[in-house]
Image (tube, rainbow, N blue to C red):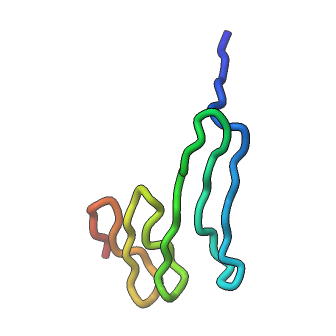
Amino acid sequence: MFRILCHFDNLSKKDNTALNRLTSVNGSGAAAKSYSSFDYDTRGNITNNSHVEMSYNLANQMTAALGKSYT
């Protein structure tokens, strides 16, 4: 028998409605925590999600993430 324990009561998100972008995701309850916050470049690409930094070229193609470069 498996039992799944949930350490938060709810997930909530915050948006920048003017730019139509997600800014953060948080859990509330007994073990509340911040899961991710998001940073964007001027073209709307996610450049940081609290875990990974990402870079893009002018065609909005990912060029780097997790310490690796892509061509």
Q: Residue at x 46, y 82 (%)?
A: 41
Q: Nearer the viewer, residue 10 or 47?
A: 10
Q: Is residue 29 above or below residue 64?
A: above
Quadrant, the N terminus? top right
Question: Measured from the top left, where is residue 22 in percent x and y?
Answer: 63, 69
Q: Residue at x 66, y 76 (%)?
A: 16
Which residue is at the far top?
1
Q: Is residue 42 above or below residue 62?
A: below
Q: Nearer the viewer, residue 62 or 11?
A: 11
Question: Measured from the top left, where is residue 49 in percent x and y?
Answer: 47, 62
- 4 relative to 41 in the view: left or right: right
Q: Residue at x 45, y 88 (%)?
A: 59
Q: Residue at x 52, y 56 (%)?
A: 36
Question: Measured from the top left, where is residue 9 in percent x and y?
Answer: 72, 38
- 40 relative to 53 in the view: left or right: right
Q: Is residue 3 above or below residue 43?
A: above
Q: Nearer the viewer, residue 3 or 23?
A: 23
Q: Nearer the viewer, residue 54 or 20?
A: 20
Question: Measured from the top left, where is residue 15 in percent x and y?
Answer: 67, 70
Quadrant, the C terminus? bottom left
